[in-house]
Image (cartoon, rainbow, N blue to C red):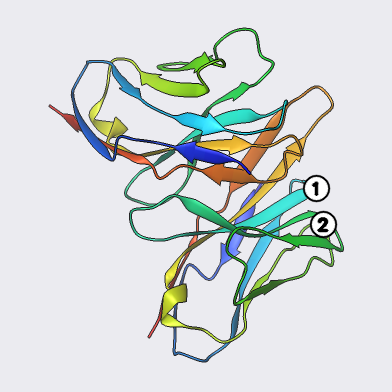
Amino acid sequence: NAGVTQTPKFQVLKTGQSMTLQCAQDMNHEYMSWYRQDPGMGLRLIHYSVGAGITDQGEVPNGYNVSRSTTEDFPLRLLSAAPSQTSVYFCASSYSTYAGIYGYTFGSGTRLTVV
Amino acid sequence: AQKITQTQPGMFVQEKEAVTLDCTYDTSDPSYGLFWYKQPSSGEMIFLIYQGSYDQQNATEGRYSLNFQKARKSANLVISASQLGDSAMYFCAMRGAAGNKLTFGGGTRVLVKP
């Protein structure tokens, strides 16, 4: 059971380049989300999805794009990388039940540096 | 909008002693939940404990307990019998009624001294 898998673990980009951070989960969770963590700070929500074909913006969505064509995958696209996007990116999947049980699983993170 | 505040940027604790990490929150959702995560220097997010807004009793998980005071909108984490391996960043986070995303506080860095 792999949980949430993020690739790559490390990436260096030049300003203006584009790239996609991959996120896959094998737990059949309905919800998935992307967060960024800047040095010494908590995680901030970029985009999230409540199911295949449904996405919405979080707190800091500018410069990022997402889509969710399947339950398992939720890629994050950087359209034109900027130094301000240097950060650690976490993908998470989650579920909720009518019994009020909530579970969140985080990937191991992608450390992105934009030069 | 939801907000989580952790007012202690860092703290030292002696090994084998207990430590309390503060977390206050603000939300208009009648149904919500509070999480605590540990982030060691390796960077992964480790789930510690969860408290739902309608839970009658305070949550406990091994050495971790959550002091939930709904009227004060606080959800403090208590770590008993601190160990050297408890040295890490600790984050308080909240889910709203929809449960599909989390709002995080700024974190508290804990350093356990031998």
Structural crowding at the residue carrying mark 2, measured as other residues with C-alpha within 10 Å and reported as few (<14), some (14–19) or many (≥20): many
A65 to the left or right of B34: right
Check the picture and name the quadrant holding the C terminus of chain A: bottom left
A49 to the left or right of B12: right
Quarter of the image where one finds residue B3? top right
Q: Which residue is mark 1?
A: A30
**Residue at image x 50%, y 38%?**
B4
Residue A93 picture location, percent across and down: 68, 49
Q: Secondary structure at mark 2?
A: loop
Tag 2 or tag 1, which sits nearer the N-term?
1
Quarter of the image where one finds residue B63? top left
Residue A113 picture location, percent across and down: 40, 76
How far is the residue under mark 1 from the one under mark 2? 7 Å
Question: In the image, is residue B35 above or below residue B52?
Answer: below
Question: In the image, is residue A34 above or below residue B37?
Answer: below
> Looking at this rendering, what residue extends furthest in the top direction?
B57
Residue A86 picture location, percent across and down: 42, 73
B52 to the left or right of A107: right
Question: In the image, is residue B36 above or below residue B42?
Answer: above
Q: Which residue is mark 2?
A: A71
Q: Is residue B40 visible in the rendered structure shown here?
A: yes
Q: Chain of mark 1?
A: A
Q: Secondary structure at mark 1?
A: loop
